[in-house]
Image: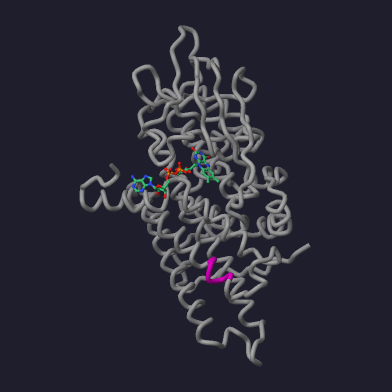
Amino acid sequence: MKSDLFEAPDYYHVDDLLTDEHKLVRSAAREWVKREVSPIIEDYAHKAEFPTQLIKGLANIGAFGPYIPIEYGGAGLDQISYGLIMQEIERGDSGVRSTASVQSSLVMYPIWKYGNEAQREKYLPKLANGEWMGCFGLTEPDHGSNPGNMVTNFKDKGDHYLLNGAKMWISNAPFAQVAVVWAKDENDRIHGLLVERGMEGFSTPETHNKWSLRASATGELIFDNVKIPKENLLPNKSGLGAPLGCLDSARYGIAWGAIGAAMDCYDTALRYSKERMQFGKPIGQFQLQQKKLAEMITEITKAQLLTWRLGVLRNEDKATSAQISMAKRNNVDMAIKIAREARQILGAMGITGEYSIMRHSMNLESVITYEGTHDIHLLITGLDITGLNAFK
Ligand SMILES: Cc1cc2nc3c(=O)[nH]c(=O)nc-3n(C[C@H](O)[C@H](O)[C@H](O)COP(=O)(O)OP(=O)(O)OC[C@H]3O[C@@H](n4cnc5c(N)ncnc54)[C@H](O)[C@@H]3O)c2cc1C
């Protein structure tokens, strides 16, 4: 079993900005990742399997619905605690963090915010304790960055709805018991529907051959005349703003998560640079390697401060979608660059599964694409500051 030597960098004493509760929540998540994730994750990534045995532990550290009220089984924490949990999990693996993000922000959040009381009571406690897993179907084979053009649709058949269409690239799809599915009604308006495994005509084939997020299960959602009970429609919000509201919450979590992946790469490279001898010196003594490490800690520190501030704004309910886009884009880009540089510091060892860096690097290729691509987040900032739409 591999030992996890991770020590979190905190160059600007960002810890001084955290409360005791934040630190407690983070340390529970950090210890759990060291104990349960690090020893097995490389093996599961190799096998391209999601380690389902982690589900209970994720629930126990509050990763399923960190900010969902306790009365519905959530952890009732603030946005910074939510972010810190995501940071620690992604320090272990982006795929495991994706599973938690989907469960919390893309499944529990819409049921909590857009659902009725009966739906909240039926689904949220089971999702919070991991008895049920959920997935979120927005992307379609022909509609990724432009989900508003989706073709998945449902028709009112009097006592039920009839759902047809397909979703693609859906995290957790192969094992989820419930899917939050975004589909258009007969007036072209987007609504969320709760589709349960076992409904006739609903299938979830797994997507294979991924070189990224290998420890996360991805699949399709296929709806072939699926009869949906009317009580399974989320009644309290419709239109594209409904799924986008969920994405705000998930993207915020990703901004923190990416810091975790970057910290792990930096910490690994720093330790290696002090141990690996070439030309009679530790490679960390060469200026070129110091430049890489110094730039990494600078970028991590900037991302920590940006994200902490965003967390404060989220706690005050003042963060805009565009601010969240900026943090998601900046932090994932920062992490992917750090992973590449860190890999080089490890030389040939960097490409092996002996170290986590190559896995982080491959994972981050998905993270930079999903929940809005790097380009799309730039266009969101562009639109926000100019008022001019460059999407179309
Ligand atoms: C591992 C993984 C898990 C995922 N999980 C989920 C999930 O759980 N649920 C879900 O609904 N989706 C999920 N996705 C899908 C993800 O959100 C989409 O892949 C993403 O939105 C991009 O869509 P696309 O892949 O169709 O790319 P496209 O939209 O086809 O984009 C291709 C390229 O064109 C660029 N582009 C597109 N439009 C513009 C424009 N207007 N201007 C400039 N450039 C543009 C993009 O930036 C990108 O570089 C997942 C994806 C992956 C890889």
> In the rendered view of the protein, which quadrant contains the C terminus?
top left
Q: Residue furthest bottom?
A: 280
| Left or right of 192 in this view: 31 | right
Q: How many marks?
A: 0
Residue 73 occupies which quadrant of the picture?
top right
- Residue at the spot x=55%, y=43% of the render? 75
Rendered view: 342 above or below 119: below
Question: Residue 293: x, y in percent?
Answer: 51, 77
- Residue at the spot x=45%, y=75% of the render? 295
Question: Residue 48: x, y in percent?
Answer: 68, 48
Q: Residue furthest top?
A: 158
Q: Nearer the viewer, residue 384 or 301?
A: 384
Rendered view: 166 above or below 218: above
Q: Residue furthest left?
A: 387
Q: Main secondary structure of the magenta part?
A: helix
- Figure quarter occupied by ligand 1: top left
> In the rendered view of the protein, which quadrant contains the N terminus?
bottom right
- Residue at the spot x=54%, y=39% of the render? 169
- Membership of 225 in magenta stretch: no
Q: Nearer the viewer, residue 31 or 285?
A: 285
Question: Residue 335: x, y in percent?
Answer: 49, 62
| Left or right of 298 in this view: 87 | right
| Left or right of 43 in this view: 244 | left
Rendered view: 320 above or below 296: above
- Membership of 342 in magenta stretch: yes
- Residue at the spot x=49%, y=8% of the render? 159
Q: Nearer the viewer, residue 198 or 350?
A: 350
| Stretch in magenta | 339-343
Q: How is the image coloured?
A: one colour
Question: Residue 304: x, y in percent?
Answer: 45, 64
